[in-house]
Amino acid sequence: MSTVVAIDGPAGAGKSTVARRLAERLGYAYINTGSLYRALAFAAKSSGIAFSEIDAGFLNRCELEFRGADLYLNGCKLGDELRAPECAQGASVISGNPLVRDYLMPVQRNSANGQWIVMEGRDIGTVVFPDAEKKFFVTASPEERARRRMAQSSEVAADATFESILADIIARDERDSKRAIAPLKQAADAVLVDTTGMSIDEVVEYIAEMCR
């Protein structure tokens, strides 16, 4: 078993907030793997490269590393720019690229570095750390996730509506779960946590208790 608490689940399920607070509660490091895909989407957009055209040459020019919970791209710390809607959309597109996934696998695995961590993403418990000490699949209804996403104004376009956000979430679920490489799915030994109607504190306390 590796020293990892793996938290997987679909977009908008609250994984990042839950994982971050859980790490604080347990005294573990926190790693958000989704930010890696967003960082590559940010780099591609900044370089004028289409998400569908990312190749080995582009990836070789991108050096990603976690320093604690902070992510650095070519030595520069990344932050709020990764929360832009186009980075979220781009992350979903490039996550199906096998070159990208191969490139990011060692970055994700090396981030553990022998310490206890809470890592969240789409395939942590199934692909990245299949031997994780604890695994959870955090989800919620599409409608609940759309409402939460609307509340995060920095994550959505200015003209977005509940209906458009819901449609995007459903489309992303379809894309993530049916991609050929590391599709979104619950690991056989993961605990399902449906957060519909639950507060963040309730979810964190529930998972923390199971980790204890």
Image (cartoon, grey):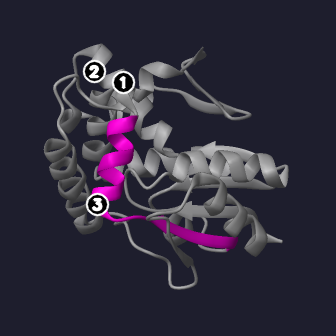
Crowd rating for badge 3 (residues with CA inside 10 Å; few <14, some 14–19, many 20+)? many
Q: Position of residue 110 (x, y in %)?
A: 68, 48
**Which residue in the structure is indicated by mark 3?**
142
- First of labels 1, 3 by sequence position: 1
Crowd rating for badge 2 (residues with CA inside 10 Å; few <14, some 14–19, many 20+)? some
Q: Is residue 143 left or right of residue 81?
A: left
Crowd rating for badge 1 (residues with CA inside 10 Å; few <14, some 14–19, many 20+)? many
**Which residue in the structure is indicated by mark 1?**
42
Q: What's the residue at 32%, 63% (across, down)?
A: 181
Q: Amino acid at mark 1?
A: Phe
**Which residue in the structure is indicated by mark 2?**
45
Secondary structure beneath dot 1 equals helix
Q: What's the residue at 34%, 66% (across, down)?
A: 183
Secondary structure beneath dot 2 equals helix
Say which of 71 and 153 sits in front: 153
Q: Position of residue 197 (x, y in %)?
A: 46, 63
Would you say the residues marked 2 and 1 are in contact, meaning their CB atoms lie under 8 Å apart?
yes
Could you tell me how far apart the alpha carbons at marks 2 and 1 are, in whole angstroms? 5 Å
